[in-house]
Image: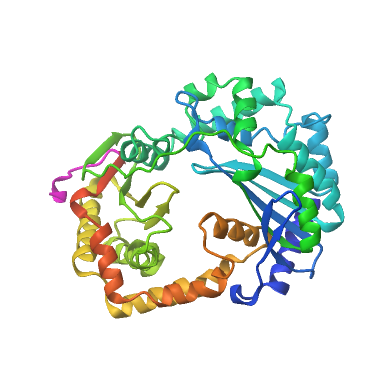
Amino acid sequence: MKNNFIAILSFIFVIGGFTSANAVEVKEVKSKSGITAWLIEDHTNPVISLHFTFKGGAAMDPIAKEGLANMVSGLLDEGAGDLDSQSFQARLEDDAIALHFNAAKDSFSGTLKTLSQNLESATELLNLSLSKPRFDVEPIERIRAQILASIRNDMSKPGTKAFDALFAKMFAGHGYGRRTDGTAESVARIKRQDLIDLHKNMLARKNLVVGAAGDITPQELAKFLDAAFGQLRETPNITTVLETKPKESGDIKIIEMDVPQSVIVFAGAGVKRDDPDYYAALVMNHILGGGGFTSRLYDEVREKRGLAYSISSNIYSFDHSSVIVGQAGTENSRVGETVKIIKDEWSKMSVNGATAAEVKDAKTYISGAFPLRFTSSDAIAGILVGMQVDNLGLDYLDKRKSYIGAVSVSDVQKAAKRILRPELLDVFIVGKPGDLSAIN
């Protein structure tokens, strides 16, 4: 009930204080020990949300121990300092504090939400979880069992199997090709000392990024930064993730699974966030498959032919690589027809680009939809972290619309020709597809 109360206040907080992404001021805050955070301050309601990220993540998991970072993320709030798991969770519940951790391929992150009156308690608990996690035997085995159950469940999902196979192929031999939560075999190999070592080596002040939103002043935030993160080691001891290009080949792979509908996942190399063609690629992808009901793929595959309930494409920009990935599901007998249309649309966009009307509509939608991401104080804090990780600058919220507006029809055509190479489009199909001769 208390956490629901926080969620309600966060909603009111956004409606009252953040009606437009262009109407807010982003402040940079530095603590005495040199920790930096970006803040959007609003005192309409007594709620504080924080996002923090340590650069690193699951791509650095040791070979044969994939899922290590993910497992650590599940254990940091399972006892710390003098508090065992139950006592720690009870403190969070009693003080209506929401604390969560997550591992992604390029990051190890956390979120904290608290009523401002409980900031001192929230700070103490966050500090304990980061600086003095216990890694007790009972929580380790309980979290391990939960992860193994999740992995078994994933293996029954055709979509997950398709994505896993695609990434394993395109990033073979690289951390991006391995599952973030590992495999049943790798998770079983993880020892308590592995957890201790990762926590010690990855969580450090120099690879920390913090975003905050809500009922906190810059002075209060500076004190919080030192109190919450000041006990961490200064410099991380982590391996370097190497730059890599997706291994495109134009292959079509089939993974047999007894399901009534096949899942189709298709991908090619994308553009990283700092690429000069990023915004043109964003507009291009919206027109091709990212625009929901208005995209070309949706129109050709769903609307005109009824081949799939949904179809989409997205650009995945990692720190050291990028892919553009699409997904669709269709009945087994019509897989060949669906894949052919996907490849045809890939080719048409690559050769001809987009029309002036399509580019105008896409730019209008992308610019207009961005403020809707400011749906909660949580979301705002997360956006501030993303802005720092991607080196976008304090004024990005003011400038983003102009970046999208500057994209021209020729920019989209250039990006499409560069990115969309239908002869190299990799396709993974999980199911029991029928005749695929229509593809050739």
Point out residue 412 in the picture as x, y percentages from the top left corner: 30, 70
Asked if residue 122 lies left or right of residue 397, the reply is: right
Could you say which is closer to the camera, residue 94 or residue 44?
44
Magenta stretch secondary structure, dominant: loop
Tell me: residue 242, above or below residue 357: above
Asked if residue 381 lies left or right of residue 358, the reply is: right
Point out residue 185 in the picture as x, y percentages from the top left corner: 48, 21
**Residue 1 in sight:** no
The residue shown at (49%, 29%) is: 66
Could you say which is closer to the camera, residue 417 or residue 97?
417
Asked if residue 398 lies left or right of residue 213, the reply is: left
Q: Splitting the image into 4 quarters, where does residue 297 fall?
A: bottom left
Highlighted range, magenta: 431-440
Could you say which is closer to the camera, residue 271 or residue 179?
271
The residue shown at (82%, 63%) is: 46
- Count of numbered circles in the view: 0
Q: Splitting the image into 4 quarters, where does residue 84 fall?
A: top right
